[in-house]
Amino acid sequence: MDNPYVGAGVYVNPQWSRLASAEPGGSRIANQPTGVWLDRISAIEGNDSPTTGTMGLADHLDEAEKQRAARSDGQLVFQFVVYNLPGRDCAALASNGELGQTEIGRYKTEYIDPIVSIVSRPEYSKLRIVPVIEIDSLPNLVTNVSPRPTAVANCDAMKANGNYVEGVSYAVGKLGAIANVYNYIDSGHHGWIGWGDTVPEYDNFYAAAKTFASLLGKNGATKDKIHGFITNTANYSALEEPFWTVDDLVGGRPVKESATWVDWNDFNGEVGFAQGMRAELVKQGFDSGIGMLIDTSRNGWGGPNRPTAKSTATNANDYVNESRIDRRYQKGNWCNQAGAGLGERPKAAPKPNIDAYVWIKPPGESDGASEEIPNPEGKGFDRMCDPTYGGNVRNGNNPSGALANAPLSGHWFSAQFQELMANAYPAL
């Protein structure tokens, strides 16, 4: 079908629901659907993670089938995240994975193949299954490689060995061969790859679309097996800025050219970015029917600090900073952002060419530890999760904006959950 989210419910993860319900006020959102993350091989069968508990993929699918059968329409979407590439998240230590840069064989045989074996079981054939494929992988091959000033050695290595493209295309080809599977590939967000060719040497929007298109034809990843793309996964970029645009004139110049926050970015929200990226992807050879998902789990930016009107400032930076609802120090800040709130609740077909708003990142799950925590999960310490960090070239040397006392990525972070509810927009 064109949009798997239309005319269907979406799976509510009972493990996340229990954690949410246990929080004061959490019952208000505990029935919302969220993504199931398979962030290492052991998660397929189930493990003892504080967040994912002991439910494996088959356990979740069994529960999803029960939820589907209990619905009067008999239709249910099951969302899960494929997230275990070799050399995963080459520019972010907090979300490093268990597989080394060259372990593409293990990725295929120990991770993707077992997932495919489970998902293809006939007892799950009535579900609409949505894999979200490899968060934060392919955009890294554009923005964080040489000769760009934001280059990272690990990303250079992953571009050189080709294992990101090899792994993503393999996952897409294998999963896409299952009739009731709808693949969506991660495509970053506007604050990461929203720069077009106004300044050609900084173009990453068109370069990213070309990188995504390089998947086509590899390992069976044909365009009919790619249902769409997702933006803003586990990120904080606002859907739209209601009070200003990048073309607003201040002092006779567009703020796109003069405001530090915008810094020549062609977009200031995820809806415009997602629709623009979709149009470019079709030009690059993807099917004209592809749709976009947007993760709205933490991009509401409500609460008392939310602006209520356009600024009247005559200085470009003041104008943008006083008008914008996204309160981060910089668009590149991604770890446990202070002041963030729950965004739009999951819904199907909210805008043209947007298949759904989704909560793929379960609210309350940490992005990364605020200090080094030894662990057996392969997760390192990233200074972008440290609230005392002053930044680096990738975030314009701005403060990290991260919350203190955060646990490892994927672990429950009660203080963040409470803040997300307090700053929800629309309000709870």
Image: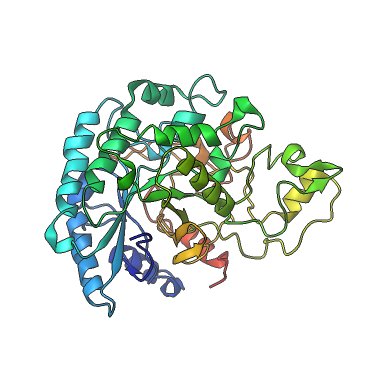
Q: In this view, does 296 lie to the left or right of 272?
A: left
Q: What residue is rendered at 57% in x and 71% in y? A: 427
Quarter of the image for residue 346 reads: bottom left
Q: Is residue 12 left or right of residue 402?
A: left
Residue 406 seen by the camera: no
Quarter of the image for residue 167 reads: top left
Quarter of the image for residue 113 reads: top left
Closer to the camera, 45 or 215?
A: 215
Q: In which quarter of the image is the N terminus?
A: bottom left
As drawn, the residue found furthest toward the bottom would be 72
Q: What residue is rendered at 72% in x and 64% in y? A: 308
* Percent coordinates x, y for residue 217 in the rendering: 30, 34
Applied colour scheme: rainbow
Q: What residue is rendered at 18% in x and 64% in y? A: 62
Q: How many labels does the image show?
A: 0
Closer to the camera, 373 or 383?
A: 383
Q: Is residue 217 left or right of residue 419?
A: left
Residue 129 seen by the camera: yes
Residue 53 drawn above or below residue 381:
below
Residue 4 drawn above or below residue 266:
below
* Percent coordinates x, y for residue 115 in the rendering: 20, 48
* Percent coordinates x, y for residue 73 in the rendering: 29, 77
* Percent coordinates x, y for residue 4 in the rendering: 34, 62
Residue 43 drawn above or below residue 305:
above
Q: In this view, does 89 lie to the left or right of 58?
A: right
